[in-house]
Image (cartoon, rainbow, N blue to C red):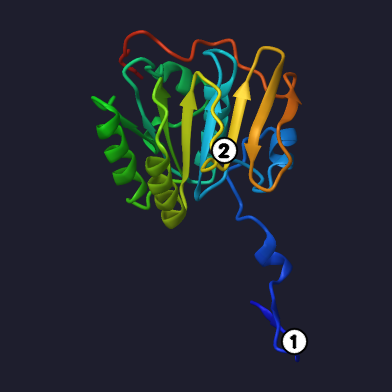
Amino acid sequence: MKAQRQDGFNFLSPDQLKSPPGLPTGISDLDGFLSTGGLPRGGLTCLSGSPGLGATSLWMQMLKLSQLRGGLGAWIESQNSVLNPWTLKQQGIKLDQLFWVSPPKDLKQKLWVLSEICSLDLFESVTCSLDRDFLKDHQLIKLKRLAKRHHVALIFISNQAWSHPELDLSIHFQKKQTLILKARHRPTPHSLERRDLYAHALSEFTSERKVLCG
């Protein structure tokens, strides 16, 4: 509620100045630095880095915490990066709380799938791999409007570092440090030590899909 003074000016309350809560990653240094306390809901996030450096691992950790609160997530596969379901199971992720989408045939179909899933109002997070695709300005603007309207964290995973004005958060994983290239209401770039953000030793991706049994 806005506080009204006798001179006619209205001021925002402290609560209205706070960013809406995001999806915690469980990494205290990262969540503490971000104004949202986690990956922003209602915005766009990019997690980038070479395979094995931690981008997908961070997403899995966020998803696990989200599921513990009863949240649902969606994962859209790409043609070149097939997520290994055994890795998810061993990380404690519940596959019955993850909506798994087969790889779209091209970028146009991927954008359509993203729009449709965001519009369902079912998921706390929707994540996809960009492969080598970088979205154009008007595509990002449309997706950001959808994310904000449906209060979903829309997350891209990319091998290449990516910072764009429409992104609310961009984190790039390197061998010796992790760089926050952009974060809402925070000075960037900002680096975090790898001791707090590390990739697990298990293989995250498999060259071909495996059937999950048991």
Picture coordinates of residue 112, whole percent (x, y) = 27, 40
- Between the residue at mark 1 and the residue at mark 2, the CA separation in whole angstroms equals 42 Å
In this view, which residue lies farthest toward the bottom?
6
Pick the quarter of the image with the C terminus: top left
Pick the quarter of the image with the N terminus: bottom right
Q: For this rendering, which residue is in front, 103 or 182?
A: 182
Quadrant assignment, res 57 = top right
Q: Amino acid at mark 2?
A: Leu
Q: For this rendering, which residue is in front, 27 or 211?
A: 27
How many marks do you count on the picture?
Answer: 2
Q: Which residue is mark 2?
A: 65
Label placed on residue 5: 1
**Marked residue nearer the N-terminal end (1 or 2):** 1
| Residue at 29% from the left image edge and 24% from the top image edge | 103
Q: For this rendering, which residue is in front, 8 or 25?
A: 8
User: Is label 1 in a helix, a strand or a loop?
Assistant: loop
Picture coordinates of residue 149, whole percent (x, y) = 42, 57
Picture coordinates of residue 8, whole percent (x, y) = 70, 88
Q: Is 82 above or below relative to 189?
A: above
| Residue at 66% from the left image edge and 19% from the top image edge | 198
**Circle 2 crowding by C-alpha within 10 Å: few under 14, some 14–19, many from 20:** some
Quadrant assignment, res 101 = top left
| Residue at 59% from the left image edge and 10% from the top image edge | 201
Query: Left or right: 105 with respect to 40?
Result: left
Q: Amino acid at mark 1?
A: Arg
CB atoms at circles 1 and 2 under 8 Å apart?
Answer: no
